[in-house]
Structures are given as structure tokens and as C-alpha cells.
Amino acid sequence: MASKDKTIHLGAGATFKLETIIGESTFGEVWSAHWLQTDTRVALKLVHQQQMARYSPGVQERWPEELSKEISFLERIRAGHVIRLYRHGFFEEMPVMVLEQLHSCLYRRITSNQEMFALKTHVEWFRHLVEGVRVVHREGVRHLDLKPQNILLTPPSAAGQRLKIADFGTSRTGPELHEHAGTIGWEAPEQFFPAQQTRGSYLYQTDQRADFYALGLLLFFMISQGQKTWFSQQCQALHDEGQELAAWNSKGRVIGSLTDMDREIFLSGLGEYRCTEKGRRLLQLLEQLLAEHPENRPQDAREILVGIPF
């Protein structure tokens, strides 16, 4: 069991001393750790075995499989806007990832109320996200859990901060129907509303354009200084009622595109750019990203990059 000051050995030259938990999910936990041989701080992503023990055997099998899948993907990737994997191995017969430890996450930076960021900073961060997604999609992978907590920031420097995409545990490949993947309030409509119901189970149909919708939600979140769209709020309310059945019964009645109130919130966040050509084009890009139907969204990341007006 992982605990403070626990030492984990992952082979020659790879001994890590656990320090503090810096992130948690249903089945995973991320620890800040001291890499003894290099005297550096890294992030260790482990299976949260106490939590996992509360679930059925089928669910227990799925999380180690997803972590192994994430390891396989990150081993292939060396990109500036995707988190870096240093090492991997096993601890108590469960997979472990050794990742770069970054400064903060987008959620904390936007909601801390300690500083206001210039619009151009948000747009540059958004460009980082699109470039990261472009690399991910090039590998035939869709992330399906792009949310502020999974977007990490490098330490401040004279060149500014870069954003990096993390947590590929719910990513998918291929066109097959799949179980729910994502986080309520940060999903495209096709991620939230099931495509198929069979004997009480629900399946979903997604492609890379689901990630583009999430990029739109992230852009809205940054420009509005931490607010969420009406659709995101409605999804959370349906989830509280009993997510999949409530979503199935509401399919076609809850609209995923921007409302007039959403547009006003976004325009207010643009400040001095509200009535400019650049502001108009940024709102137009947001409308395209948050189109309810995937066929009305951009078809690839390059199209999004071309549409960024700054």
C-alpha cells in the first residue's frame, strides 16, 4: 500500500520515495516523489487499491488495463504539449508511471482569484492545447477527458508557461461503441447522451471531434474566468438525478450548443476585444467547437489552429 515515505523500486537507478498525494481519481492516485538517484521531484501515478477493492472484479480489472494502455501511448509520444513519461514498472503487482512533475493545473490557476490573465495569454494557452490534441489525434487516439484538472502548467519562466495534457486513462481508439468515458460537465453531447441502450447498459459513439467540443469548453472556461456553459450545468444536474438513465430520457431535449447567455458571458470576458474583428472571430471559433452535432465542428486540429485570430 502506498504511504508517505514509502520507497518504491522500479529497477536499476529508479528508486523513489513517496512524499505527498498531489492528485486522486476513483481508482488512481498521483504522488509527489523524490527520485533518489537523480535528486529530482517527479510524479508517480499508482493504482488506488483501497478504492478499487470496493468495486466488482470486472471493474477492478479495467483500471490496471487502462493504466497500461496509458503507459503504452506515452511511451510513443515525445511532444512539447503532452506530459512526459520517464519510467514505468510495477508496485504490488500493479502498473506504476513515473511522470514529470509540473507546477500546477489549469483549474487552480483560473479559479484561484489571485491573478487575472490577459486575453492573449489565454489564447496562447488554448493554442498549446490544440497543438497537444493534434499530436494525440495523429497517433489515432482521442483523449475524451480534457478538463482543467488534466491540463498542467510548466513553472513560470521568462518565456511564459506552457500547458501540457495529462491523464490518458480514459482515451479510446477505433470507431467501436464504448462505455462512458469522461467527466460530467466536460463532455461533448455524444459523450453524455448514450447512443445505445441494451438491457440496462449504455454505449456511446465518439470520434476525435468529441475532443474538439471539450476544447471549446476549455476556451470558454478560460475566457470567462472559470464559468461553465449552460449545457455543462445541465449535464451536471442530470448526472445528479442518475446520469445514464436521465441522459437517455433527455436525449434530444437538452441542446449542446451555446445559449445567448453563454455568448454574453464569453463576450464580457473578451474585454477590450469584445467589439473587434479578433473578438468576433474568436466567438465564431467557439461556436464551431461547441456545435451540438460533430459534423458541424472543425474536422481536424489544423482547422482550429488556422481559426485562432491572435
Image (tube, helix red, strand yellow):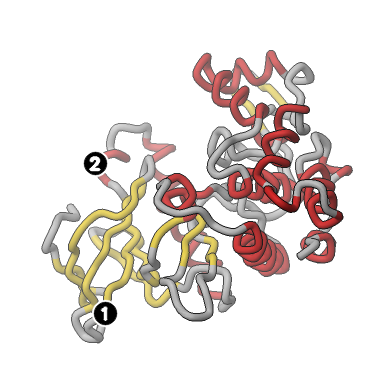
The image quadrant of residue 30 is: bottom left
Q: Which mark is residue 172?
A: none
Give above or below for 176 relative to 35.
Answer: above
Give above or below for 12 relative to 145.
Answer: below
How many numbered discs, if any? 2
Q: Which mark is residue 50?
A: 2
The quarter of the rendered structure image containing the C terminus is bottom right
Q: Are marks 2 and 1 in contact (CB under 8 Å)?
A: no
Give above or below for 138 relative to 267.
Answer: below
Instruction: Please report the residue visible at 30 percent of the width from the left and 55 percent of the height from the top.
Output: 22
Q: Position of residue 145 (x, y in %)?
A: 57, 47
308 or 62, which lies in front?
Answer: 308
Q: Which is more N-terminal, label 1 or label 2?
A: 1
For the question of whether residue 66 can be seen, the reply is no
Q: Position of residue 88 (x, y in %)?
A: 37, 71
The image quadrant of residue 67 is: bottom left
> Callout 1: 10 Å neighbours few (<14), some, many (20+)?
few
Instruction: Please report the residue visible at 73 percent of the width from the left and 33 percent of the height from the top.
Output: 264
The residue where tag 1 is placed is 40
Secondary structure under tag 1 reads strand
> Callout 2: 10 Å neighbours few (<14), some, many (20+)?
few
Q: Position of residue 53 (x, y in %)?
A: 28, 38
Q: Amino acid at mark 1?
A: Thr
